[in-house]
Amino acid sequence: MIDFGDFDKVFETLTRHSPRPWQRELAKEVNCRNRLVRIPTGQGKTHGVMVSWIYHRLARRDNRWPRRLVWCLPMRVLVEQTFEVADTLRRNWSQQGVESEPFEVYRLMGGDEDASWFVHPERPAILVGTQDMLLSRALNRGYAAGRSRWPVEFGLLNQDCLWVMDEAQLMEVGLATSAQLQAFRDQDEAKHRRPCWTWWMSATLQPNWLLSVDTAQVHQNWVENLCEIRPDARRDELWTITKPVATDSIGWDEHKKFAKRVLQAHDDLSDSEFGKITLVVCNTVERASETFDELSKVGRRNGMELIHSRFRPAERESWRDRFLSRDACRSGVDRILVATQVVEAGVDLSAGCLVTELAPWPSLVQRFGRCARYGGTGRVLVVDRGRDEKRAAPYNVQELQSAWEAIQRLKDVGIASLEDFEAGLKPEQRQRLYPYEPTHLLVRKEFDELFDTTPDLTGADLDIGRFIRSDNERDLHVFWIDVPKDPNKSRSWQPDANRRPHRRELCAVPFEKARGWLCDKDKLKKDKQAWVWDWLDGEWRTATHGQLLPGRIVCVANSCGGYDLRRGFDPKSEETVSVVGGEDRPSTSEEDRVADLADAQHDGEPLSTHHQWKTIACHSREVADQVRAIAAALELSSELQDQLELAAWWHDWGKAHPAFQGSIRGTETIARPKRCDLAKAPDACWSKKDRYRFLDDPNEERPGFRHELASALGLFALLRAHCPWHPALLGPWQEVFKTIGGPPLTAFHEAALESPPPLMKRLLDCDAETFDLVAYLVACHHGKVRVGLHAGPKDQDYQVRNSDDCGLPIRGVRNQDELPSTQLVPDEPPIPSVTLTLAPATLGLSFETGKSWRERCIGLQNRFGPCALAFLEAILRAADARASCLDTPDPALTTEATV
């Protein structure tokens, strides 16, 4: 058993080696805060930061430290290796006995998101993902996630988290977005339930990169006491490694000449303790591929590998063992690696010779770190392939010009030489070498608007891609599947709705290149078959040009080609693509499965499908127990715990609506209980043909019905009927109504109950702010009804049978619908029946329900801030998902008659 109070002991136990001085210094600060970590490559940044979090959050059990460590990286290949580091630490930590609080490690990449991280928000965890997946979720528009999942991840990633922006120099506009997000969280700090901090980390990090109008007030606090290696601590052998540097100029289209120069440099290299390895770094995938091909043509037949970001993980899995690890760099190895920027960070590789195209100074410094990483002496050749506007891409001319001028002043690019060089830079020289001008800047108004996940009338959303990557670097993800060979069937065929991609088969592709490969102007080319997921209907639909957007997952017929096992994504390849097998996919927990199904479509009731029958009261009790336990573990105030529990008791009242009950039918082998308060039913009993058709009126059907909206409107109806002058309803507007006049309350007012059920009394005793919060949490507990109360696509198809003046439904609920008397709490009297009204959905002041729904939501957002409000949403939804997986029998149904 280790001494959890001794950082050195914790570090040694988890990493199997002693901490470096800078790692020890970092861990000394017990207060978590925003900060910068500027440590040279090869000095153990990952271990230093991860173990510091483990030490404070888990070993010292300091609740001031967030329970989630969010590790954000610019590239997928970095995610995979960082995940392995974190998981090794997790395994080592778990071996320390019962006194050590466990934590889990999760990957957040397309096709590989484990739902259990947000189903258990009270558990410590390390989340490792790309900036695309993580920043999009922090902006409430999660890539490759269902719309209803967005608020959960938004809430949990903006509360109770320590963000680590690793390799920040590669994040482009994403770096600025991370700073803006932290500034907005700092502005709302007093409203937040749990802290959220950011650490920006890079060997070339510059404090002024984080400066903007919004960060100006807090910037000085962020950058003070920069974590770096002091001059007196630069003593280990890595600081003595020399790396002589030379330069050359070769035209951008002289691929053969460049390949010969690479071969010459490699031939001049001798075998060493770490092998004979030359690393070639090109600035684009296209040039890397051309160089790889030319090397074969000029005589290099074996011992070559191509490395870039357009490979599937299934092919990348072997890279570490074969050539991207310390063990792969050994005497006797003769290898040339041709790569792109993916090797600039996090790659455990030591090349005796580095040949790199001219790049911006921060990128060059990172590339120099891959040469002679373990010791000895390295050789570096920097090749200028052109510095005009056309040849400089993806960089700009000034960046390359500044880097070229700097490299002319150096004879060596070892760590010590680089540190000495930068120490002597004047401010204007440093600014030229480290420019940073993000193309877009997220402002507070846009951030607040992103809280609302309702699409506009065209089904579109605010474009957040510009806040994550530059336009030419925004990816979608492709996976390939077998399709029927019969041409008569294959054109109308579509993948099974249950077919979900796994991380191993997804290939990142720039969305513009995907469009050019698969589509003509508006639709697919005649020889292409591709599908995207339709969230409205929960199925795969034929893709169009406009649907191929950043963050989307695209399913493609493997006969369409587009991928080569040695070259990765290749739109020119017409060979049938091998399909990644699914036999080794990790098993999915019941909680993951249920959460994924619930969030994958606009309508439907996956959480209501269960192998046991359950009543609303039984399920509500289980949700109330779960939410109370989560809220207590998170140490929320007793007031918030009570409000979350109250929302849990009311959340499924809408399932008593005849549209929901009519969806549950008996079968030949399974009888339906004779009651109208069922919350869960076996899958076979969910009517496919008569979904949302009333039991007692087969002509009345409500496609797209959302029970949570009925639940929330039921709360308004209770106040309207039994306490219309309640402060949450019409109370504040009495004088207004007297002045302007209004309909008589007798139209809907019933006599107050002498002894209302205890649950109803709790609701009537709420103040206006509490009522609004409870109603909101009830409505949004599936993420499908939130800020905007608008008719859904299926509401437009409703056929009005009688001239009843009730109008079209909103999400399947009509004016004057009846919500029957229902028992919501076991052993308590039932809640009286109510008549629903859609008045909250109207704009302005209502004579029936007072303030509009949108005005109430704006008030809640102002009161809690968008992050904390979504955090409360996430807690209730986690409780609901967990309760929906419980196998406990319902006592009310043990002797129930059936039909």
Image (spheres, rainbow, N blue to C red):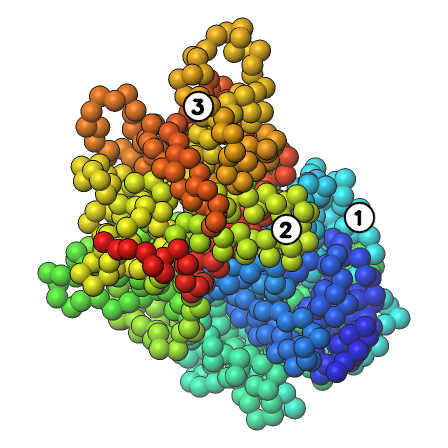
Give whichever of discs 3 and 2 has the lower sequence position. 2
Mark drawn on residue 221:
1
Q: Which residue is mark 3?
A: 750
Measure the alpha-carbon separation of dots 2 and 1: 20 Å
Give whichever of discs 3 and 1 has the lower sequence position. 1
Q: In front here: 376 or 703?
A: 703
Badge 3, how many Cα within 10 Å: few under 14, some, many 20+? some
Q: Is residue 631 visible?
A: yes
Q: In front here: 450 or 593?
A: 593
Q: Residue at x 41, y 59 (%)?
A: 890
Q: Which secondary structure, mark 3? A: loop
Where 411 sits versus 31, above or below? below
Measure the alpha-carbon separation of dots 3 and 2: 43 Å
Q: Which residue is mark 2?
A: 159
Q: Amino acid at mark 2?
A: Gln
Q: Amino acid at mark 1?
A: Asn
In the rendered image, residue 192, in percent from the top left (x then y), is placed at 67, 45
Specify the farthest residue to the left: 488
Give whichever of discs 2 and 1 has the lower sequence position. 2
Where 814 sits versus 389, above or below? above
Badge 1, how many Cα within 10 Å: few under 14, some, many 20+? few
Q: In front here: 221 or 705?
A: 705
Which of label 3 and label 2 is nearer to you? 3
